[in-house]
Image (cartoon, grey):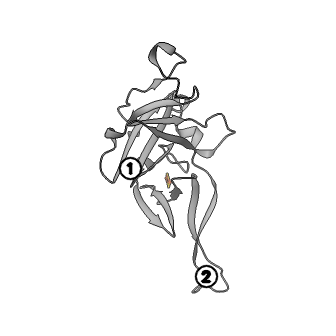
């Protein structure tokens, strides 16, 4: 099954006074224009520095995370965006795992076996899907990748290394 997109070009910003990028921190990457995510809810998949990234717009908020599902490499980028138990989640089409878009935590309903009818509650587990910092400035979306911060389960499905497997 094909899981890779026709990637968009991104541009790493340089410390170049000629281009007047002084307002943009050096560790941020220009991802795209906000006009590329129209409407109240939209998404855009792109590749930045060899990483498969999904940008999600929901209302006035923007989120970024690894595109491919941490569980088994499913197309999380195509999943439904749902508000569940007060959290905004992406639901993976393959096995219906839910991922919080702001934190990358897996999200599930837990049950106290001694009180199964009254104890069902939404619970956020540990971070499994890598998220990335998003900043919107003058109609552009900038990302700060977090791929140098330890290892997460989604890393193995969202890098150039995975492309070559
Ligand atoms: S691959 Fe996404 S839930 Fe299994």
Do tag 1 and tag 2 residues touch (Cβ < 8 Å)?
A: no
Which residue lies most toward the right here?
150
- Residue drawn at (41%, 55%), measured in percent from left and top? 93
In this rendering, the answer to whether 118 lies above or below 132 is below
Q: Residue at x 30, y 46 (%)?
A: 38
Residue 33 image point, x, y percent: 36, 35
Q: Position of residue 37 (x, y in %)?
A: 34, 43
Q: Which residue is mark 2?
A: 119
Q: Quadrant of residue 108?
A: bottom right
Q: How many marks?
A: 2
Q: In the depicted view, which residue is nearer to us: 162 or 61?
A: 61
Secondary structure of the residue carrying tag 2 is: loop
SS class, disc 1:
helix
Q: Judge by depth and name the residue closer to the eye, 130 or 157.
A: 130
* Residue at 61% from the left image edge and 35% from the top image edge: 147
In the image, 4 versus 32, the foreground residue is 32
User: As drawn, is 39 to the left or to the right of 65?
Assistant: left
Mark nearer the N terminus (1 vs 2) = 1
Q: Residue furthest top?
A: 18
Percent x, y for residue 17?
A: 51, 15
In which quadrant will I find the N terminus?
A: top left
Is residue 121 visible to us here? yes
- Residue ID for mark 1: 78
Q: For the residues marked 1 and 2, what is the alpha-carbon distance in whole angstroms?
A: 31 Å
Residue 7 x, y percent position in the rendering: 38, 31
Asked if ligand 1 lies within 8 A of label 1, the reply is no
How crowded is the residue under tag 2: few (<14 C-alpha within 10 Å), some, or many (20+)?
few
Query: Is the residue marked 2 within 8 Å of ligand 1, measured from its CB?
Result: no
**Residue that appears at 55% across and 41% down:** 132
The crowd level at tag 1 (other Cα within 10 Å; few <14, some 14-19, many 20+) is some
29 up-or-down from 150: above or below: above
């Amino acid at each position: 099954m094909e899981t890779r997109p026709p990637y968009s070009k991104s541009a790493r910003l340089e410390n170049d006074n000629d281009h007047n990028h002084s307002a943009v921190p050096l560790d941020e990457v220009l991802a795209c224009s906000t006009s590329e995510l129209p409407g109240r809810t939209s998404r855009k998949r792109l590749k930045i520095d060899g990483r498969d990234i999904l940008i999600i717009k929901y209302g006035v908020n923007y989120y970024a995370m690894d595109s491919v599902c941490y569980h088994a490499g499913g197309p999380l980028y195509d999943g439904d965006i749902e508000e569940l138990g007060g959290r905004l989640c992406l639901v993976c089409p393959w096995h219906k795992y839910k991922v919080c878009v702001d934190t990358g935590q897996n999200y599930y309903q837990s049950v106290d076996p001694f009180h199964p009818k009254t104890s069902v509650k939404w619970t956020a587990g540990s971070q499994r899907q890598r998220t990335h910092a998003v900043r919107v400035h003058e109609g552009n979306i900038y990302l700060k990748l977090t791929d140098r911060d330890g290892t997460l389960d989604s890393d193995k499905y969202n890098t150039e290394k995975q492309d070559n497997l």
